[in-house]
Amino acid sequence: MTALSVNVNKIATLRNSRGGDIPDVLTAVDTCVAAGAQGITVHPREDERHIRPADVKDIAERLIEINTQKTPTIEYNIEGDPRPDLIDMVLDTKPTQCTLVPVVAGEITSHTVWDIRQDGDTLKPIIAALKDADIRVSLFSGTDIEQIARTHDIGADRIELYTAAYAMAETEAEIDGEFRLLETAAVKAVDLGLGVNAGHDLNLENLPLMQKLPGLLEVSIGHHLMADALYIGMEAAVKAYRRALGQHIA
């Protein structure tokens, strides 16, 4: 089964636009978990424009509380660039997984992948430190086979395939072509012993085909799920995305 990890950044974005604590991020986490989400994702940026350090800690504590009463446990995935304060936050919080993502100054959302040839020497000791703390490490990845091999060489546990090009494809030929690139990359990752995650602009329309991606363990979805939640409600949106992944819902 491919797990659904819900990114709750947009809840914090809406809260921050007004100030105060409404909507409440922890209530959103509780709702997602109650609807069957297998994980919660956050991406705390340096400018704190959505998820803040206090949220990261609060969510960690809430998931610990939930997981003492729930099997299987809900995973916690913290995404971000490997800046010192982010790594310290991750080591202090000890999530299930840390997804390292390169950040470009001024970007609205993540849109670049790691160049392991250039960044590998910097990433390798960071990956080692996270793994020493029993935190699974995933790297935001494109579909270049050589880069995926280098990702394995520097010690990462998983890749998160960047799916924007696939999600933005319009014609059947474009969709098929982009999916084949993801498929080839996923096969390579699995052959190397890497786990495969995916994320970026996945939605109810393009998600069903992703069920066919070899070895896909997890998708992380925020923006589109939250947009759908505005129309149909958070619980219904989480369940709709679970169905799109082929998950059975009683």
Image (tube, rainbow, N blue to C red):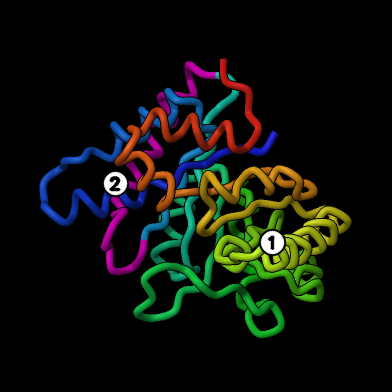
Residue drawn 46% across the image and 47% down it: 41
Mark 2 neighbour density, 10 Å: few (under 14) some (14–19) many (20 or more): many
Asked if one can make out residue 16 in the rendered structure from this viewpoint, the answer is yes
Give the residue at mark 2.
11
Can you tell which quarter of the image residue 150 is in? bottom right
Residue 111 placement, left or right of 185: left
Residue 100 placement, left or right of 229: right
**Residue 124, x across and y down, in percent:** 67, 70
Secondary structure of the residue carrying tag 2 is: helix
Tag nearer the camera, 1 or 2? 1
Can you tell which quarter of the image residue 170 is in? bottom right
Q: Nearer the viewer, residue 229 or 214?
A: 229
Kind of residue at disc 2 = Ile
In the picture, which quadrant includes the N terminus? top right
Residue drawn 36% across the image and 28% down it: 30
Give the residue at mark 1.
172
| Residue bounds of the magenta highlight | 45-70
**Residue 151, x across and y down, in percent:** 73, 68
Mark 1 neighbour density, 10 Å: few (under 14) some (14–19) many (20 or more): few
Q: Residue 46 in magenta? A: yes
Kind of residue at disc 1 = Glu
Q: Is residue 129 above or below residue 62?
A: below
| Disc 1 and disc 2 in contact, CB within 8 angstroms | no
Residue 40 placement, left or right of 250: left
In the picture, which quadrant includes the C terminus? top right
Q: Residue 167 in magenta? A: no
**Residue 21, x across and y down, in percent:** 16, 42
Residue drawn 19% across the image and 49% down it: 15
First of labels 1, 2 by sequence position = 2
Residue drawn 48% across the image and 57% down it: 79
